Amino acid sequence: MNPSADNPLLADAGWVWHNRFASLGPAFFTRLPPSPLPAPYWVGISPSTAQLLGLKTDWLSSDAALHAFSGNIPLVGSAPLASVYSGHQFGHWAGQLGDGRAIWLGEVQTPTGPLELQLKGSGRTPYSRGGDGRAVLRSSIREFLCSEAMHALGIPTTRALCITGSPEPVYRETRETAAVVTRVAPSFIRFGHFEHFAARQQWPELRQLADFVIDHYYPNCRHNDRFNGNTYAALLHAVSQRSAQLVAQWQAIGFCHGVLNTDNMSILGLTLDYGPFQFLDAFDPGHICNHSDHHGRYAFHRQPEIVRWNLYRLGQALQPLIGEPTIAEAALEDYQQQFSDSFLQQMRAKLGLSTPCHQDTALVGNLLQWLALQRVDYPIFWHRLSVAVAEDHFTPVRELLLDPVDFDSWLPRYLARLGQESRGQVAATMQHTNPRFVLRNHLAEETIEAAKLGDFSVLQRLQTVLGSPFDAHPDHAAWADFPPAWASSISISCSS
């Protein structure tokens, strides 16, 4: 291994580092290096994320990169640290949390703006709460694949640059092996960062954090008329709007996050922390994808409500800066309207409708009612409907239903609505909105089982398919088919 000609203990990716978060000071983090990962090996690499970061392919495949992204040697210019935050978990105040197994490496300049890098699974930190600070190969593969799949679907998300694995044993329900995911985002600041300083009544730090987020990510909040120049109310409103738009996209695509605690909510409206997530198979609004969620708090249909609840916790944290409670309430009062508008916009696109119409709410509502009543496979229904509109042949859609009476009643209304649209444009919109491929649980499980045996080719192929989910990929048509019977027995929990 030769990480650097000048210093064999350093790796140089050629980045220009900014490290703005590190400028906040010691109240916000603890400086410490990642724990070395013994005998690391490559599991997966995202070429598109590497390109985003301006990394050269030959360097990324080097021993220097392998060891740097395993936490074994430092990157030139990085400033490793673990940040502190608090939060509500499953609706209860959990107190101090923090980066229990993640090390923030720093922030690099890219052609699209500054991006932060983080090693997830890189060992114990002062915030590990007794945990080992490691991530397992199983959950690391799920996060790597899903974050890249969500990006390809056009849904705001953190990205994943790579996964490295190790034979080091990690104990969860069973003995597993360790892995590290290198995550990428404009910022990893969470609602819980604000809750931490508010709960401790550290008002200078709370203001410092809010000003930091406004200055770097929401500068328009400095010049707002809606809240009479109240910058912090404008911040709360902006975060509320982004969060509403994000959860609308989740609901439209059929994505269940599984653990929407306040410490898993991004201040930038990104999908953050892929744990017990799932894309719906059968359309079941009450589906609970997290087997640790015994009371169904984070069931699929409750996600918009839970995001709103989390925003109110953020509002409480920002209250000392905002001032009057009524102003904070005003900053959140149109969350539901923003969600409803965004969701209807998403569903119009899925139906190929480019112009709004007053009857669309009922058209969408009726559709979702009978999809739920008959537990129709959600991704397959939308893909078949897209093809049916293009070919003017709806029998394959009808065959999805045990009792097609509701579909037979709904279809003429839909076709009449399409009469107001260009059919060619409708088909094009639908086929670029309704994916053939999503990361179903059984596909992730098959990939994980192969990886445990040292076969990463399944991951590479699935990564390619999920990277262009609207394309045909005829060699992998089976991945767009119905899930096998055993898929319903897959158990996904918070353990990772």
Image: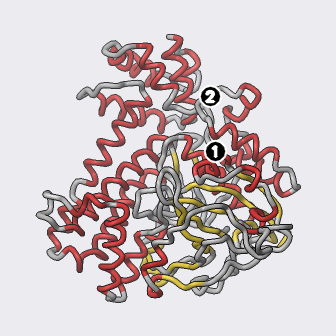
Which residue is drawn at the image coordinates 23% and 53% (left, top)? 334
Residue 111 % position (x, y)? 51, 50
Q: Is residue 386 left or right of residue 218?
A: right
Upstream in the sequence, badge 1 or badge 2?
1
Q: Amino acid at mark 1?
A: Leu
- The spot of residue 209 in percent (x, y) is 36, 76
Per the image, the residue denoted by label 2 is 471
Numbered label attached to residue 149? none
Q: Residue at x 86, y 70 (%)?
A: 39
Quadrant in the rendering for residue 276: bottom right
User: Between residues 253 and 323, which one lies in front from this camera angle?
Assistant: 323
Residue under numbered circle 1: 439
Q: Is residue 119 visible?
A: yes
Q: Relative to 140, say whether 126 is above or below.
A: below
Q: Is residue 170 visible?
A: no
Residue projecting furthest to the right: 453
Looking at the image, is 475 positioned above or below residue 113?
above
Of 287 and 428, the residue lying toward us: 428
> Residue at horizontal 61%, vertical 74%?
103
